Image (cartoon, rainbow, N blue to C red):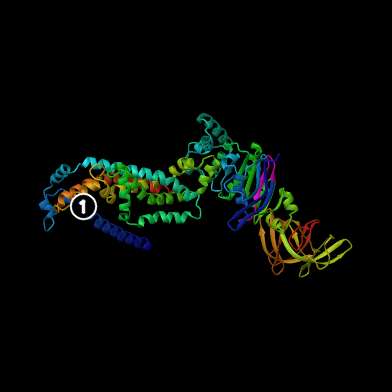
Amino acid sequence: MTALTLKNIHKQYGDVIAMKGIDLQVQPEEFIVLVGPSGCGKSTLLRMIAGLEDITSGEMFIDNVRMNDVEADARGLAMVFQSYALYPHMTVADNMGFALKMAGVPKKERYQKVLAAARILQLEKLLDRTPRQLSGGQRQRVAIGRAIVRRPKIFLFDEPLSNLDASLRVQMRIELAELHRKLKATMIYVTHDQTEAMTMADRIVVLRDGSIEQVGTPLELYNHPANTFVAGFIGSPKMNLVPAEVVEQANGSARLDLGEGSSVTLPSHPGLAPGVKLTVGVRPERFVQSDTGSISGVIAVVEHLGGETLCYADIRPGTRLTVKLGAMSPVKVGDSIRLALQPGGALLFDADGKAMH
Amino acid sequence: MKFAAGLKKQDVLRTGGGWLVAVVMAFPVFWMALAAFKTEQDAAAVPPKLFFEPTLENFVAMSERVAYWHHAWNSIVVSFSSTLIAIALAAPAAYVMAFHASKLTRSLMLWMLSIRFMPAVGALIPIYLILVALDMLDTRLALVVITCLSNLPLIVWMLYSYFKEVPPEILEAGRMDGARPLKQLWYLLLPLTLPGIASTGLLGMILAWNEAFWCINITATNAGTLALAIASFANSEGQFWAKLSAASLASIAPILIFGWITQRQLVRGLTFGAVK
């Protein structure tokens, strides 16, 4: 049984097509992250799942029950909004108990359930306050608490951490991951931040322009991106994507020219005939500094981050590589640098940007 | 510091200007209030008298001539009930317009407001005939219905603008929590916009209280409000300034006092939303 099934979901606003045939299956207790740049439709998709937006065409099932025409509150979902959307005129306890009140749960039972949820989030002492007396992080907790109280089949999160400052965001990220383990609940989480996606997700769904680009575990997406978009979107610092041309293929290896004397030699591969133009993708940590390296460049920027050093090297005008080096690397702006690739460090993408396997 | 000093100078000018406008606007009311306590001779005196021996004879004359309490009660009933009914009708309409707008919403709102562009007299004869047919002339019900309907567009507009300030996510959260539209309105929107609703209500009440056209044309001694009572003093018998002033003062006093009592809550309510 799946917790949520989306079949060929479309969304259209007038002439604008916002979602173009989304297919997705979410397993029970799975933490799914929908990620993509702004305008990719991730929030729209979440709101369609929630029942706040109509589904133009396609079908949606929760626990194998068709949900297209079911009202938002009857779908058994709870949503945490980006702006928290707490009820400003109610206390924390009333905020958390509002859904139960609407469902006609007696006051005493309501209080018990609110208290139980408050304990999970350490909100017991704040139950009598109103939202305006709370800090950003506390408001965020209340919003999550409001969702927990309902014991939903699926939790929906719409960029819940984007209004918090950086350190609090990291802390809440860890708390959310713990909460997911504790509650053993199915969660669907929308973010534009690939770090949140990588750290929290069981599976990531990468969206662009209303279509799914790739679905997979964080490491699958990191190591085997399906196309240059996913390759560039997942991972920080970004993967280097360098245009290249096959110049030689012999004895089971192929040499790719990167321009201005830089080249890489890779195990041969069907489709790597001389003259073929493609894109080479290399993660910043897959470079090795080596005097015999076949890639040469001039260092333009150096960032010492303490534990590691990021070095930006121009291999030709307009092509800048991001290279992750050890903390003690004695590199200076203006130096020439020679780089080699770790074995298996390069991914190849064809002219359409699709991964070549 | 120079900048701050400049700002202060501007503030002084603004305050002075504000007072000037206020005095100009309030002067007729003040003069009317004075005249209400003058004898007819003093009221008509040239040059006008600022100092005189006050008298209550005008109020005595007024209460002999019109049933003040009867008309005052009518005014209270008509202004309260027409405003309450208008708000009850306008709130759901404004809710839909603010949160579930369609392509037609904007034109609908303009059309509603355009009804007020028409002079009331344009509708007088049809409405008069309808009331005759329904045997409702000189009834409070007729006055309540007409006042309510004529204030409705304005009240919808005001509530709409207050509702618009509520973030839609709050209602969406309510929707996820199981609150259908009427419950969203009752549990979320009304409490959140209470100050706005209160000022809308006050405005509606003032408009209804001061409404004279329909009152004079479709009511008489039975359902007439204070507006009718004042009107009966301005007739062909001549200019009785002092008595007219006394009647006017007695008519506006209740709503003036009511506004004065509620203004503190209103001002507090209106600034309440600004401090998040």
Where residue A356 appears, x then y in whole percent?
A: 79, 58
- Judge from the rendering whether residue B269 lies leftward or rightward of residue A99; answer left or right: left
Image-quadrant location for residue B27: bottom left
* Front-most of residues B211 and A242: B211
Q: Quadrant of the C terminus of chain A?
A: bottom right
In this image, B66 relative to A142: left or right? left
Return the residue found at the far top.
A108
In the orientation shown, which residue stands out farthest toward the left? B41
Q: Nearer the viewer, residue A50 or A120?
A: A50
Does residue B23 appear left or right of residue A118 in this picture? left
Depicted A237 relative to depicted A117: above or below: below
Residue A224 in view of the camera: yes
- Residue tagged by mark 1? B30
Q: Quarter holding the N terminus of chain A?
A: top right
In which chain is the residue bearing label 1?
A: B
Q: Position of residue B57 (x, y in %)?
A: 13, 45
Instruction: Name the one closer to the observer, A218 or A170.
Output: A218
Amino acid type of the residue that numbered disc 1 sits on in the rendered structure: Phe
Crowd rating for badge 1 (residues with CA inside 10 Å; few <14, some 14–19, many 20+): few
The relative height of residue A259 versus residue A286 in the rendered view (above or below) is below
Q: What is the x, y in percent for residue A351?
A: 75, 63
> Residue pushed farthest front?
B133
Please provide percent x and percent y for residue B185.
46, 43
Please check the rendered image and state whether residue B227 is part of the magenta-colored stretch, yes or no. Answer: no
Judged from the image, the secondary structure of the residue bearing numbered disc 1 is helix
Residue A32 lies in magenta, yes or no? yes
Chain part drawn in magenta = A25-38
